[in-house]
Amino acid sequence: IGKGDDEVRLKSIAKKLKLKNVIFTGFVSEAEKRKRLQRAWFTVNTSMVEGWSITNIEANACGAPVIGSNVPGIKDSVVDGKTGLLYKYGDHKELAKKISSLIKNKRLRTKLQKGAIDWANSFTWENAAKQFLKEMKD
């Protein structure tokens, strides 16, 4: 879902590997994005760096845990073992193991889905205001 600098290369790889279940949707409406995320067992974020990665919180809010690279931004928005799983950036074998574990282990997936929703629900304007006021006092 969406677009990015690597889209052309990724489409080429998918075509070369004849991956028929890989779909590049481009941008979709917010309603369509929510619908797709609510159906997802999990999402994967392989970025080498992120600002904070609101996309991870959006996925979590829809009940989709995130498998993400353990880099700034992503490691701040994914709580390893609670809202998703982190792997060492560039370690494709570890990433594959994490993906496989969530596909095969429904119990772990369910635990992470619940943790993801709880984590995302903690990001409210009220909580942000309380945190802001606390920081201002300190």
Image (cartoon, helix red, strand yellow):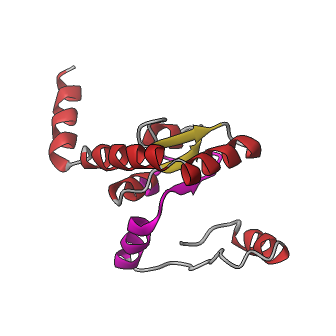
Q: Does the rendering let one see residue 52?
A: no
Of residue 95 and residue 71, the one placed in the foreground of this image is 95
Residue 125: x and y in percent read: 19, 49
Of residue 3 and residue 91, the one placed in the foreground of this image is 91
Residue occupying the point 25% across, 49% down: 121
Residue 119: x and y in percent read: 32, 43
Q: Does the rendering let one see residue 118?
A: yes
Of residue 81 and residue 119, the one placed in the foreground of this image is 81
- Decide if residue 123 is on the left or right side of residue 47: left
Residue occupying the point 38% across, 74% down: 35
Above or below for 38 versus 92:
below
Residue 48 in magenta stretch = yes
Could you say which quadrant of the image residue 5 lies in? bottom right
Residue occupying the point 56% across, 79% down: 26
Of residue 98 and residue 135, the one placed in the foreground of this image is 98
Could you say which quadrant of the image residue 132 lies in? top left
Q: Tell me where the magenta segment starts and ends, as one range.
A: 30-55
